[in-house]
Amino acid sequence: MNIAIFLLMAGLQVAARDTVRLSLADAIDRALEANPTLQAQRASARAREQLPLQASQAFLPTLTLDVQGMRTTDPVAAFGLKLRQENFAQEDLTLDALNRPDAYPGFNAIAAVQLPLLAPEGLFGFAAARRAARAERAGAHRAAGATRFFVIQAYWGSQLAARRVAALDTALEAVRGHVEQARAMREQGLVTGLDARLASLKASEIEVQRLAADAQARNALSALRAMLGLPDSVELSLSDSLAGATVPSTCAGGAEGCSFSDRGDLVAYQHGVEAARLGVKKAWASQLPSIAAFGTAAHYSKDAPFGEGSGDWTIGVGLSWRPFQGLAGPGAVRAAKAEQESAEAKREAAERQAELEVLQATRMLDAAREAADVAARAAHEAQVALEQARLRYRTGAAPITELLDVQAAATQATLSALSARRDLLVAHAALDLAYGVFDR
């Protein structure tokens, strides 16, 4: 008995652990943390944010540490090793020793530092890399905004699918009641057996619709789980009601402070244009000289690294300039200018698209408001008509076909009202998405 109770409690704990209750806000928060697509976008942005660090060699010193061990019979190398180790002797000056030296070992430990003093190409490259990183970060913000919208859409879509199943269950129960009523009235001799058959046919039709709606509801929840990074085995319980939800958009009615210029994608395109402009300057700067200071410290030994031997140091300043590189320089400048023109055209196209999306979202929101009002009134009238049709059939004033038609119309009106409600909530979110509210 105790074992059975233990197993029962364990099963209840597993069931409770595998059920996740989510409000819309909870679902959005989880998606912003766990959505795989968004995680990939953010990781890509973090990778691009490292580009300025990679380009920092344009103004930060570069330190190189090098340790080598060798054994050589090369005349020049052997001569150099002995000289650097201060092991050069009189007998090493003989022609035979110089031309055909014995194998000689050596270890070199060298530290070299280089500090750019003037590197125009590298400086413009660093600035362009910073702009590119900012563009990628803004793109990630836009991806987060889109994720938020898609979660809202999927959340209310799942709620609508569940309510559709519930509405069809209600309609199926009502029609089955009509079947029983028709049979009872037939036994009383008030109607023929045709009424019950017609009602049964309608019940079968609704049952088929209900099966399809149930599959759609389960698919909708699966899609929402995928957005939230949850396995399909997790049971979702959505706490926010479709009928009672009120989530107006921030920018509804042209609210003050709403401007699509702050959208993440437009900000990304603007940074892309700036990066392209800096790319043109970098291409020009690649044809200018660069100046750098440098220094080395070295230690040379015969038997082991850092062993007994000698060392030396070198410091200096160098200028590097390649005034003519064939036609590579002009070609790089022209390519960079073309990239700039492309970036500016893409930004302009994105701005026009954003303006169009705001206009379309505003119109769709206005239409959704009106549609929700009309659908709500129609659903109420349909329920009144259904009560009248039931009364007319009970009193023999109307045939069963009228009752079934009104029942179907009432069910459709209920579904239309639910769809209109979902469309209104999604339209509010679409307007905020168009303005970039979710990107901030």
Image (spheres, helix red, strand yellow):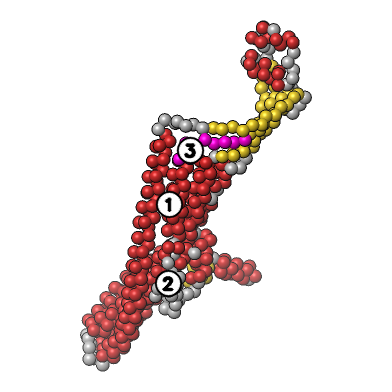
Judge whether 63 appears above or below 89 on screen.
Answer: below
- What is the magenta range? 284-293
Amino acid marked by disc 2: Cys
Give how far across and how far down residue 277 sits, in percent: 44, 48
> Which residue position is annotated with label 2?
251
Q: Is residue 67 magenta?
A: no
Label drawn at residue 402: none
> Which residue position is annotated with label 1?
273
Q: Going by the image, does 56 lie left or right of 160? A: right
Q: Residues within 10 Å of mark 1 (few under 14, many from 20)?
A: many
Q: Residues within 10 Å of mark 2 (few under 14, many from 20)?
A: many
Q: Earlier in the sequence, mark 3 or mark 2?
A: 2
Q: CA distance from mark 3 to mark 1?
A: 20 Å
Residue 111 in sight from this viewpoint = yes
Q: Going by the image, does 286 lie left or right of 177? A: right
Give how far across and how far down residue 346 sits, in percent: 37, 53
Choose mark 1 or mark 2, whichever is in front. 1
Q: Going by the image, does 394 lie left or right of 337? A: left
> Which residue position is annotated with label 3?
286
Residue in the image at 64% along x and 9% along y: 99
Nearer to the camera, 43 or 404: 43
